[in-house]
Image (spheres, rainbow, N blue to C red):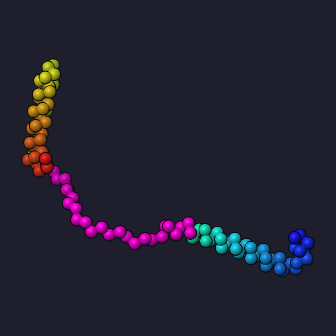
Amino acid sequence: MEHIIKKMPTILKALIYGFISLLGYIVIALLVTITFSGCSKKEPIIIEKVTEIKVPTKCNIALPLRPEKSENIITNISGIAKYADNIEVVALECGAVK
């Protein structure tokens, strides 16, 4: 193979090397194009489904006072239960869904 390359004219060698380089650049360009073709703009997906969106609003109802801590655990638990019931009533008056 080497003796064939040595007998070729210089211009022909330059053309062959140029052609091989051009093929290399074309292959690289094709690889980049294929790689980034997944990033191309796609048609948007339109969903025509109506959903209700609940927007929180401020409620001007005063919250009940928290029960005081005592030494008796049963009293604490019953106070917390009553407090939770009162909070639930206030939330329902303010428009909360049960």
Does 75 appear above or below 88?
Answer: above
- Residue in view at x 74 percent, y 76 percent: 19
Q: Is residue 80 visible?
A: yes
- Residue in view at x 53 percent, y 67 percent: 36
Does 85 appear above or below 37?
Answer: above
Q: Where does the image place residue 41, in percent across and percent down from the top left?
A: 45, 71
Q: Is residue 70 visible?
A: no
Q: Is residue 65 left or right of residue 44?
A: left
- Residue in view at x 56 percent, y 69 percent: 34
Q: Tell me where residue 62 sits by quadrant.
A: top left
Q: Tell me where residue 20 sits by quadrant.
A: bottom right
- Residue in view at x 78 percent, y 74 percent: 17
* Most frequent secondary structure within the magenta stretch: loop
Report the quarter where the N terminus lies.
Answer: bottom right
27 or 63: nearer the viewer: 27
Q: Where does the image place residue 13, in percent across and percent down from the top left?
A: 83, 76
Q: Where does the image place residue 7, in percent across and percent down from the top left?
A: 91, 77
Q: Is residue 44 left or right of residue 76?
A: right
| Residue range highlighted in magenta | 34-59
Q: Where does the image place residue 42, in percent across and percent down from the top left?
A: 43, 71
**Number of numbered discs present?**
0
Q: Is residue 43 left or right of residue 3?
A: left
The verdict on residue 88 being magenta is no
82 or 57: nearer the viewer: 82
Q: Tell me where residue 5 sits by quadrant.
A: bottom right
Q: Which residue lies furthest to the front in this view?
A: 1
